[in-house]
């Protein structure tokens, strides 16, 4: 490794993106595209359960040995299932196996800006709230909290039980941003992708990452309906 490449590697501070097994993999795809479009580096952790959800919702098998091919296929697909809708550049994505507890994000000394869990299942919420660290996703989230870095948890479940609500409060008290995957309609959505991008945009807002995924409220009633 050259001195220049070594310096570049030391300066890299990625966002860790964790994808859990909840329904809503298009939310994760939109967040990933938004981060990459903003020039952010990404460290990706796809849980074992989420791979079943990705397969069910997209027909794509996400495999460790072929993660670049599978990720590109996934991120290129629109929320309506149409392939080749987007042309993402995944050159600055690093993949970590969900069972790799020796991975970089498992340590507080690993440089990262923070972590986004999209979507977050109730099992994931419970694991992070209780500090279980049963896999790399949960461990990376625990590290993010202890290091006082930004943690955004996009919960995708309804209805919510009392225990899950209490765990969400615990995450809030620990410093996380608990962000239910609830799309707003004031942005003038006309298709599924618009609703998905609204939630992804709110996740990026919470992380402080600039984007143009949805039309922002500007104080004008009827603005969305008059768009175009």
Image: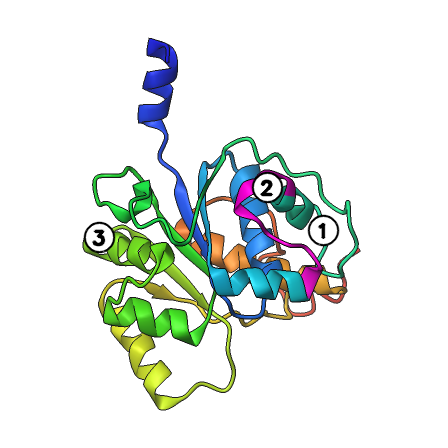
Counting residues from the start of the chain, the first of labels 1 and 3 encountered is 1
- Disc number lying in front (3 or 2): 2
Question: Which residue: 69% across, 45% down?
Answer: 73
**What span is in magenta?**
57-69
C-alpha span from label 3 to label 2: 33 Å
Q: Considering the numbered disc 1 on the image, is that residue within a helix, a strand or a loop?
A: loop
**What residue sits right under mark 3 in the picture?**
148
Q: Position of residue 33 (x, y in %)?
A: 59, 45
Judge whether 173 appears above or below 158 on screen.
above
Residue 144 percent coordinates (x, y): 27, 53
Q: Secondary structure at mark 2?
A: helix
Q: Which residue is mark 1?
A: 77
Q: Are marks 3 and 2 in contact (CB under 8 Å)?
A: no
Mark 1 is surrounded, within 10 Å at the Cα level, by few (under 14), some (14 to 19) or many (20 or more) other residues, namely: some
* Label 3: which secondary element: loop
Q: Is residue 59 above or below residue 113?
A: below
Q: CA distance from mark 1 to mark 3?
A: 34 Å
Colour scheme: rainbow
Residue 198 visible to the viewer: no
CA distance separating discs 2 and 1: 17 Å
Which sits earlier in the primary sequence, circle 3 or circle 2? 2
Residue at left offset 51%, top offset 43%: 35
Q: Give the residue displayed 76% in from the left and 65% down from the top.
A: 190
Instruction: Name the quadrant of the C terminus.
Output: bottom right
Q: Is residue 163 above or below residue 224?
A: below
Q: Is residue 184 magenta?
A: no
What percent of the width, then of the height, locates residue 109? Answer: 21, 39
Residue that carries the numbered disc 2 in the rendered image: 66
Instruction: Give x and y (percent) for residue 114.
Output: 34, 48
Q: Earlier in the sequence, mark 2 or mark 1?
A: 2
Quarter of image, res 175: bottom left
Left or right of 225, for residue 215: left
């Amino acid at each position: 490794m050259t001195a220049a490449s070594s310096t570049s590697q030391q300066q890299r501070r990625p966002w860790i993106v964790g994808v859990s097994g909840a329904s809503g993999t298009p939310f994760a795809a939109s967040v990933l595209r938004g981060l990459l479009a903003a020039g952010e580096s990404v460290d990706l952790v796809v849980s074992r359960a989420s791979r079943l959800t990705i397969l069910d919702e997209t027909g794509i098998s996400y495999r460790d040995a072929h993660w670049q091919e599978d990720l590109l296929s996934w991120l290129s697909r629109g929320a309506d299932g149409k392939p080749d809708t987007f042309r993402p550049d995944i050159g600055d994505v690093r993949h970590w196996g969900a069972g790799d507890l020796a991975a970089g994000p498992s340590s507080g000394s690993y440089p990262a800006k923070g972590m986004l869990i999209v979507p977050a299942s109730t099992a994931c919420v419970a694991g992070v709230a209780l500090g279980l660290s049963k896999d790399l996703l949960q461990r990376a989230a625990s590290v993010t909290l202890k290091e006082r870095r930004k943690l955004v948890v996009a919960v995708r479940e309804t209805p919510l039980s009392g225990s899950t609500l209490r765990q969400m409060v615990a995450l809030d008290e620990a410093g996380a941003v608990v962000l239910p995957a609830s799309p707003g309609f004031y942005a003038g959505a006309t298709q599924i992708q618009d609703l998905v991008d609204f939630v992804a945009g709110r996740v990026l807002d919470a992380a402080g990452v600039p984007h143009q995924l949805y039309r922002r409220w500007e104080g004008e009633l009827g603005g969305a309906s008059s768009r175009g």
